[in-house]
Image: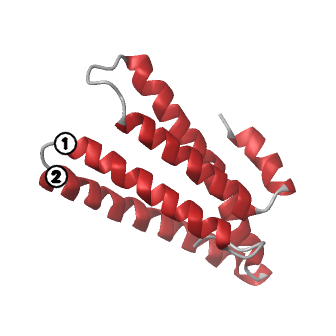
Amino acid sequence: MVAPFVGRLADRYPAAVLSSIGLCISATGFLLLRLMPANPGDFDIAWRIFIAGAGFGLFQPPNNKAMLVTAPLARTGGASGMISVARLFGQTVGGMLVALTLGLAHPAPTRTCLTLATATALLAAGISVCRPRGTSLS
């Protein structure tokens, strides 16, 4: 839902700014999920997930664009492949860490996962905002 807007924003503003804002929005969504009441309704869950997803949608396009723009023209295909490899690697490691946390964190493994997700997104936002203009997070 945010993609049509993010494309235009990525042409006007630095990737470091947009990516950092997106990561902060994702962290807010994760935190809201963590603070959710014990018996939430479907809508209570959905709007929080929407915030986290919208933040990620704001993060990824400008970051990917920055990676592709900084690659030499002859290597843009390779850069695109590396983006895919990094994304799949992150998903795999993230899934393993979630499974490990769910298995080891007691008495509230879900809340622990969401706390770690919030902290990770905020750490990434801090790193992203510090990068030189026109460079990528990866």
- The residue depicted at 40 percent of the width and 59 percent of the height is 91
- The residue that disc 2 covers is 105
Say left or right for 71 vs 120.
Answer: right
Q: Secondary structure at mark 1?
A: loop
Name the residue at 53% across, 32% down: 50
Query: Which residue was labeled with disc 1?
Result: 108
Disc 2 marks a residue whose amino acid type is Ala
Image quarter of the N terminus:
top right
Rounded to the nearest whole Å, what is the CA distance between mark 1 and mark 2? 6 Å
Tag 2 secondary structure = loop
* Position above or below: 13 against 138: above
Q: Residue at image x 43%, y 51%?
A: 118
Which quadrant, please, contains the C terminus?
A: bottom right
Q: Is residue 47 above or below residue 23?
A: above
Looking at the image, residue 54 sits to the left or right of residue 76; the answer is left
Q: Could you say where residue 90 lies in the image, as x and y percent from the top left?
A: 42, 64
Amino acid of disc 1 = Ala
Mark 2 burial class by Cα count in 10 Å: few <14, some 14-19, many 20+ = few
Residue 89, x across and y down, in percent:
41, 67
Q: Quadrant of residue 41 in the image? A: top left
Residue 126: percent from the left, percent from the top? 58, 65
Snapshot colouring? secondary structure
In the rendered image, residue 102, in percent from the top left (x then y), is placed at: 19, 50
Q: Measuring 32% from the left and 24% from the top, which residue is drawn there?
A: 37
**Which quadrant of the view contains residue 15?**
bottom right
Contact, CB < 8 Å: mark 1 with mark 2?
yes
Is 31 on the left or on the right of 3, as rendered?
Answer: left
Drawn side of residue 70 relative to residue 32, left or right: right
